[in-house]
Amino acid sequence: MTAAVLEFSTPEDLKLIYKELKVTDTGLRSDVVAIQDWISKQPHLPKISSDDFVRHVLILCKNSVEKCKNVIDMYYTLRGAAPEYYENRDPLRPEIQQSLRTVLFLPLPKLTPDGYRVSIFKFFNTDPAVLDPLAFCKVCFMSTDIRLREDTCRGDIIVWDLGGGTMSHLTASLPQVKKFIYCASNASPMRQKSVFIINAPSFADTIINLAKSFAKKKVADRTQALSESKDLLKYIPMQVLPQEYGGTYEKTMNELRDEWAKKLESYRDWFMTEGSVKADESKRPGKSNLQQDLFGIEGSFRKINID
């Protein structure tokens, strides 16, 4: 039997999530109806056909209806403000296919026993010449879109495997860092329980400190570098991790990467239609919450010295 691309929360997991949020399934459904009603009255926002999307965002916003509204508004606003991440999202495009073969933030299929999803950043091809940082960012947000529609979990455990990373990778990626983190933090309400960095090259302190400075304080405080990749087993159950990381999960990272690529392809029609819609700023009542100054990133990186 082939394992699911993402194994979902069990009824017991959902009970734990609802208890943590102090909400019932009936109450959650009622809030989703209220949010959908609010969305329908916002002239600048598109119609959202998926109640599951709204429900997942609401859970990730800890059942705060107002925060959920703000996140959904920003989700569609950023599609217009950062079109390079949200347009031309056909998963069969050559640059996206190349990026999937090169580097990926890969959500692992199995949840931890306490209901968290582990995602691993990994280079599958360490040749800097084939790295396309913009395509990587685009794939990240495409993956997040799928999870926001399918995945109910308590939160995320992130692993940055920087093995094979070079100075060339770093310098090529710098122009995307600030905008990527801003978009991820404001339009992708993932609840990050912890962030681990493994196999970091000596120069990685530059990008780690830079990323921490742009990330929300809670995320920065939950980030730690591990001296050896096997130390992940102190924090993540063996059955969740692939063999490359000392785990016992039945599939390799390459196999999981190929399965996730097929998952993206299964959403092809959606990415090219509803998945590319954005807020219509000409119809927005009042001002946007978007902080335009955070998009003036060129000057920020001119001041960075890399030893």
Image (cartoon, rainbow, N blue to C red):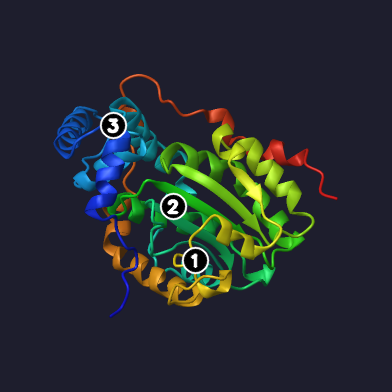
What residue is shown with label 2? 141
> On screen, 132 above or below 55?
below
Q: Residues within 10 Å of mark 3 (few under 14, many from 20)?
A: some
| Distance Cα–Cα, label 1 vs label 2 | 28 Å
Name the residue at the right extreme: 307
- Secondary structure, mark 2, is helix
Q: Residues within 10 Å of mark 2 (few under 14, many from 20)?
A: many
Image position, residue 173 (x, y; %): 65, 54
Front residue of 80/258: it is 258
- Secondary structure, mark 3, is loop
The mark lying in front, picked from 1 and 2, is: 1
Image position, residue 280 (x, y; %): 32, 35
Residue at 26% from the left image edge and 39% from the top image edge? 18
> Mark 1: which amino acid?
Met
> Mark 3: which amino acid?
His
Name the residue at the bottom extreme: 1
Image position, residue 24 (x, y; %): 19, 36
